[in-house]
Image (cartoon, rainbow, N blue to C red):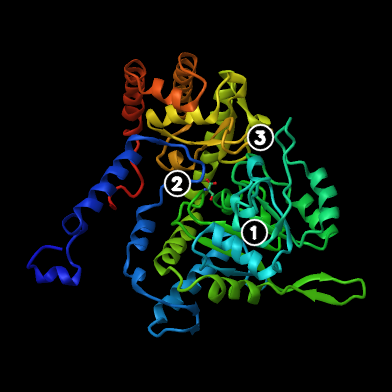
Amino acid sequence: MANGDSKAWFGDEPLEQNDPEIYNIILKEKDRQRRGLELIASENFASKAVLEALGSCLNNKYSEGYPGTRYYGGTKFIDELETLCQNRAREAFGLTAEKWGVNVQPYSGSPANFAVYTALVEPHGRIMGLDLPDGGHLSHGFMTDKRKVSATSIFFESMPYKVDPQTGLIDYEQLQVNAKLFHPKLIIAGISCYSRNLDYAKLREIADENNALLLADMAHVSGLVAASLVANPFDYCDIVTSTTHKTLRGPRAGIIFFRRGVRRTLKNGNEEMYNLEKPINEAVFPGLQGGPHNHAIAGVAVALKQTMDPSFKAYGKEVIQNARVMAKCLMDRGYHIVTGGTDTHLLLLDLRSKGLDGNRADKVLEEISIACNKNTCPGDKSALRPSGLRFGTPALTSRNLKAADFEKVVDFIDKGISIALEIKAASGPLLKEFIATMESETYQKKIATLRDEVETFAVKFPLPGKDVL
Ligand code: DSN
């Protein structure tokens, strides 16, 4: 705040003057996003309209409770906002209020999942999700033989299911056998790194055999579900959670859909009704959260409206096509893609056949301004020594890169991996030795030349929302 400027006390100074340190960090990050190629499968660029909603006065308002039943005054417009967001959420996924309720208050995907477990599974009750090294998500109950890593595995008993190490495809048969022994209360159909459609019908069958609930965590693919381009979890699942910032292209937030009405008809002819709404709403608030983030809810509502525009379906189609182009181009260059391709926005490159690993490849790609993440591949023994790289196309497709541009992106990746292989051959066996060699003058020169090429290419594609800080 400027000395002696009484106006500053009212918070009217722009960020640039009020806090140049933070302002400059934001500018540097924005420049990094502009110059680089963002291939992290869970990231995207939210639109200007979403960013404006996020930066609005809605940030200021507390509104603990739900529309019509708040614990604070002044919530007339917040009620209007949250109700509109709920209705748009149902509309975006083709759902009716008769069959589906929705909670738009979760702060993000992990809290949304934890709220569902808290609501529906008793403490130390049993759940089954895809194991993290096999492409599942931390919040689905990850633990190792040494440590319960995710709080989900501390407060609930988690038995994972796996992919077949040969094909990389989910081993539904083994899950079916294990479920009969483990008797889970809840089965989770969700992924963080699995490039194929989930077989929700099979998962429903397994859940029914065990009288278990079926939760889909569609975080990665929710935009593609809204665009009707991948398998639809709503056809089979009791509960569906999602983040809103991945393929959905909204702000960072979470959402929970839950079924209403008749669950099933019992043998005696009576109908069993779903009882999900009250426990889930109470688990979110007051169970786990306080006031909803109303600026985020506004951003979610804006993003949901955008998904209903025909242009969003076109965007989703390109996201998938671009991922397929990347997978094909990489395979044409002799790389191994787990499962042999993709049905979605992401692909998993297994570097074992090239004699490289995710840690080393990821380090060099970051140096050449390509952001992706190291990832375990089927059969990997440790999440700390992953063999692969996960790539996703939602962010760059939002920057309007087309199929031919993704061929160029693969060319950059291939060149980066070649440099990583050279560095590996010239360095000792430890990662720190690899990094020391990478930082030597010889390799820094090569890296700088390639980084210039990547950045010259990337800046040709404007960032959505570029006018918002
Ligand atoms: N971190 C996200 C991902 O990369 O899949 C999920 O939370």
Look at the numbered discs 1 and 2 and tell me whether their residues touch, using CB distance below 8 Å.
no
Which of the two discs, 3 and 2, sits closer to the camera? 3
Residue 331 x/y as whole percent:
59, 23
What amino acid type should be assigned to the residue bearing mark 1?
Ile
Where disc 2 sits, the SS reads loop
Can you identify the residue that label 2 sits on?
44
Question: Alpha carbon of mark 1 to alpha carbon of mark 3: how far?
Answer: 22 Å
What amino acid type should be assigned to the residue bearing mark 2?
Asn
Residue 135 x/y as whole percent:
63, 42
Hey, which residue is sitting farthest right in the picture?
Answer: 268
Question: Alpha carbon of mark 1 to alpha carbon of mark 2: how far?
Answer: 31 Å
Residue 205 appears anywhere in the view: no
Residue 464 x/y as whole percent:
36, 46
**Residue 36 placement: quadrant:** top left
Can you identify the residue that label 3 sits on?
381
Q: Who comes first in sequence, dot 1 or dot 3? A: 1
Q: Nearer the viewer, residue 434 or 420?
A: 434
Residue 395 appears anywhere in the view: yes
Hey, which residue is sitting farthest left in the picture?
Answer: 4
What residue is at 31 percent from the left and 28 percent from the top?
A: 456
Q: Nearer the viewer, residue 155 or 62?
A: 155
Question: Alpha carbon of mark 3 to alpha carbon of mark 2: how far?
Answer: 30 Å
What residue is at 52 percent from the left and 65 percent from the top?
A: 106
Residue 150 x/y as whole percent:
60, 54
What residue is at 55 percent from the left and 27 percent from the top?
A: 357
Q: Who comes first in sequence, dot 3 or dot 2? A: 2
What residue is at 57 percent from the left and 62 percent from the top?
A: 112
Can you identify the residue that label 1 sits on?
154
Hey, which residue is sitting farthest front in the picture?
Answer: 146
Where disc 3 sits, the SS reads loop
